[in-house]
């Protein structure tokens, strides 16, 4: 039986009234989160938050039942339901809920304005030069993050956040690096930490993915250039529906971060912490791990958990899956769900998985040997195994640590620089020149020494244009690194190996440090910021952005051989 017209009108009117109230609450949240102009007692803030939660519940009920209930509607509002439960069940969670409500209502307002006034215009500039969009969108996010971190409510009482410190932290979080000049757990308030976590999530998913998802939700279409760039960014070689691709990326990200948070919760809860603190720490470190960011709420990262099997297993697993990339995860899921043989994996997946395994094993053996009588001296054999494995996984792009990197032997520093330069895989949340690049270089050397004209792997020939791009990527990366390292060596008093280590860590968006980053000069920190930014957007993106503006020629010069070597 259908509801009468009067009831429908009444429910729609109620829905609009509640929606307006929610927007007013969201505006009021700016005062509580950012401005702190009006000083209000915590009990009053708690009461206000509970009223906000009740209003959101009322809004959800009107949305779910006013035009007929459906399971699809319920699924669409799962994030709201989650934050309502979080707000009701966990004490002292006012800021988390206020932050969510502000973001939620801001997005809805922008969505409504875009649909009415700017439909189809959001990606107009993107279609002209997508690489330029990537470069400037990262800068925009870094700029916004810097402003938010400079707000008084983002810094703990008695602490001061400088402009350069805020810029450094925002860049490090957006570029999912993990290098810090302030201790994340003590210098920043809960609000400041949530800003950092948001920047990590945005940077991990990628600006192109976030922007494209935003445009699709606004009902806009992407240009062909934009679709091609997104596929290159996430490492998807085959033509695929953009909506399916982006939904898949978000689903995979949320799935791994959710499972990781649940598993980490049990360890943190066993430390006799409150449930609220355990939940928050689990979510923060799960997101930071999957996004390969390396930000930790602990001053010594996971050094206190060196012997903890759960921490070692969960963190490294999240790092590995975040580092192999979305296309590989989807490929693995297809193999498992369809009960296919591993030989049915795509060439890209085979290269990524095999290279990842080889690098982890080589790194494990290298650290186990080089640190046996150094930093790991006195460790039990099981702790040496844990620490060597953890260091091998985290060094390629994550940035967590269970041993003190400042005390690494020179052999370990050498191993670390190589692993940090290689980095993660295409389409992942990590940086570096990527595992596929490293694999193709090794295969090219083998082919050259074997006298083979073609470069082939897994019975497939590698296209010549791919090899050219790889050579360009390596050359551009080493050129940029060389210039920045040279400047750092001129202006900084620290040892050669520490400056090299810090530079490779920044460029590979790793985040491991030998302890000199907070003590760098003003110019030194700016150079590290540039390295983090260039390492995240990628030298090739910079090259493509410049080359897009050049007029391409259709003529070719006469070929002539030259002597090399």
Image (cartoon, helix red, strand yellow):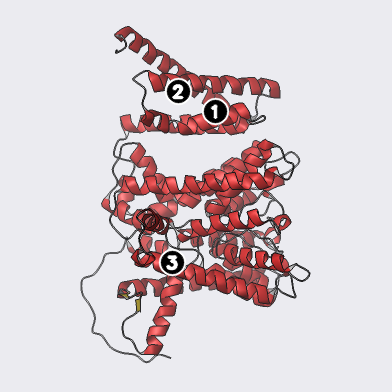
Asked if one can make out residue 413 in the rendered structure from this viewpoint, the answer is no
Q: Residues within 10 Å of mark 1 (few under 14, many from 20)?
A: some
Where residue 185 appears, x then y in whole percent?
69, 46
Q: Earlier in the sequence, mark 2 or mark 3?
A: 2
Q: Earlier in the sequence, mark 3 or mark 1?
A: 1
Residue 257 percent across, percent down from the top left: 53, 47
- Residue 334 visible to an observer of this rendering: yes
Q: Secondary structure at mark 1?
A: helix
Residue that badge 2 annotates: 60
Q: Which of the image's four quarters has the N terminus?
A: top left
Q: Do the residues bearing badges 1 and 2 touch, measured as CB atoms within 8 Å? A: yes
From the viewer's side, name the closer residue of 121 and 434: 434
Q: Is residue 322 left or right of residue 467?
A: right
Relative depth, front residue between 414 and 450: 450
Left or right: residue 49 versus residue 40 is left
- Residue where numbered disc 3 is placed: 352
20 over 169 or under it: above or below:
above
The numbered disc on residue 84 is: 1
For the point 65% across and 68% down, the residue is 388
Q: Quadrant of the C terminus?
A: bottom left
Q: Is the residue 170 above or below the residue 110 in the image?
A: below
């Amino acid at each position: 039986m259908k509801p009468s017209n009067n009831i429908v009108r009444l429910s729609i009117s109620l829905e609009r009234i509640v929606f307006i109230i929610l927007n007013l609450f969201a505006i009021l949240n700016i005062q509580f989160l950012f401005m702190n102009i009006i000083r209000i007692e915590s009990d009053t803030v708690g009461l206000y938050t509970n009223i906000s939660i009740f209003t959101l519940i009322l809004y959800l009920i009107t949305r779910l039942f006013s035009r007929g209930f459906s399971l699809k509607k319920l699924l669409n509002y799962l994030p709201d339901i989650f934050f309502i439960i979080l707000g009701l069940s966990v004490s002292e969670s006012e800021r988390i809920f206020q932050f969510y409500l502000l973001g939620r209502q801001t997005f809805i307002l922008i969505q409504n304005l875009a649909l009415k006034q700017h439909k189809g215009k959001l990606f107009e500039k993107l279609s002209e030069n997508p690489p330029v969009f990537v470069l400037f969108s990262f800068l925009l996010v870094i700029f916004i993050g810097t402003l938010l971190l400079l707000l008084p409510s983002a810094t703990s009482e008695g602490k001061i956040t400088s402009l350069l410190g805020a810029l450094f932290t925002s860049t490090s979080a957006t570029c999912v690096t993990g290098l810090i000049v302030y201790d994340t757990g003590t210098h920043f308030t809960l609000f400041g930490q949530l800003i950092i976590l948001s920047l990590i999530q945005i940077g991990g998913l990628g600006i192109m993915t976030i922007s494209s998802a935003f445009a699709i939700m606004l009902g806009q279409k992407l240009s062909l250039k934009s679709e091609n760039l997104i596929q290159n960014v996430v490492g998807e070689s085959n033509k695929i529906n953009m909506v399916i691709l982006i939904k898949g990326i978000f689903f995979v990200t949320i799935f791994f971060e959710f499972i990781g948070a649940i598993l980490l919760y049990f360890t943190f809860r066993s430390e006799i912490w409150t449930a609220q603190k355990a939940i928050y720490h689990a979510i923060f470190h799960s997101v930071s791990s999957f996004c390969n960011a390396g930000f930790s709420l602990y001053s010594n990262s996971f050094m206190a958990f060196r012997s903890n099997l759960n921490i070692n297993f969960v963190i490294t697993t999240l790092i590995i899956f975040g580092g192999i990339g979305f296309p590989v995860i989807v490929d693995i899921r297809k193999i498992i769900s369809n009960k296919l043989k591993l030989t049915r994996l795509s060439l890209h997946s085979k290269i990524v998985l095999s290279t990842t395994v080889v690098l982890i094993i080589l790194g494990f053996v290298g650290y186990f040997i080089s640190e046996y009588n150094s930093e790991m001296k006195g460790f039990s054999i099981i702790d040496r195994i844990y620490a060597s494995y953890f260091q091998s996984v985290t060094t390629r792009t994550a940035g967590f640590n269970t041993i003190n990197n400042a005390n690494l032997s020179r052999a370990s520093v050498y191993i670390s620089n190589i692993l940090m330069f290689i980095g993660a895989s295409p389409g992942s949340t990590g940086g570096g020149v990527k595992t596929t690049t490293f694999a193709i270089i090794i295969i090219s050397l083998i082919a050259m020494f074997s006298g083979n004209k073609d470069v082939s792997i897994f019975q497939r020939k590698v296209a010549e244009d791919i090899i050219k791009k790889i050579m360009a990527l390596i050359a551009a990366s080493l050129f940029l690194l060389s210039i920045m390292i040279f400047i750092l060596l001129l202006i900084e008093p620290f040892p050669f190996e520490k400056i090299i280590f810090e530079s490779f860590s920044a460029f590979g968006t790793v985040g491991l440090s030998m302890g000199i980053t907070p003590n760098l000069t003003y110019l030194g920190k700016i150079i590290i910021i540039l390295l983090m930014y260039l390492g995240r957007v990628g030298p090739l993106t910079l090259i493509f952005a410049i080359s897009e503006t050049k007029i391409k020629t259709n003529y070719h010069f006469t070929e002539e051989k030259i002597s090399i070597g």
